[in-house]
Amino acid sequence: MLSLTLRDAQHLCWKNFRKINDKLDPVRGKKWTPFVMVTDLLEEAGEVASVVKGLEGFKPPEKPKTREMLATELSDLLYMVFVLAESITE
Ligand SMILES: [Mg+2]
């Protein structure tokens, strides 16, 4: 069984983030800053909130939300927490 510490997970998220953005940064002409990372983290928190509102019946029923969507958005949020945490210790 694979045993992963939170620190390991943080490092893996950072490696994944670097792998993606080492290619995208030159195309974009800029790198992610901690400010942009915090903004992205807040955006993901908003996506979590949006799904919860949908699950609780406070969103239009045309676009139903699912618990799987909530799990995905929570993962997105945690990913950015890990990326931000690792970035400030680089
Ligand atoms: Mg998301």
Image (spheres, helix red, strand yellow):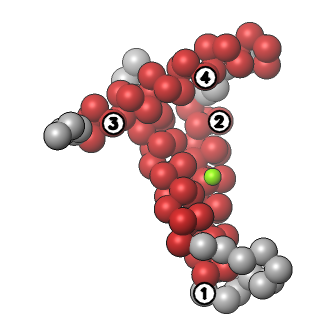
Lower position in the chain sequence, tag 4 or tag 1: 4
What quarter of the picture does the N terminus occupy? Answer: top left
| Rendered residue at 21%/37% (across/down) | 2
Task: Give, as a three-letter code, the residue at label 4.
Answer: Ile
Q: Is mark 2 within 8 Å of ligand 1?
A: no
- Gap between marks 2 and 4 measured at Cα: 16 Å
Can you name the residue that lies furthest to the bottom here?
A: 57
Could you say where residue 31 lies in the image, as x and y percent from the top left? 66, 19
Query: Relative to 59, is 26 above or below?
Result: above
Label placed on residue 36: 2
Residue underneath mark 3: 9
Calculate the distance from the C-alpha at mark 1 to the C-alpha at mark 3. 31 Å
Amino acid found under the numbered disc labelled 1: Glu
**Residue at the image point whose x is 67% and y is 14% from the top:** 23
Cβ atoms at labels 3 and 2 below 8 Å apart: no
Of badges 3 and 2, nearer the viewer stands 3
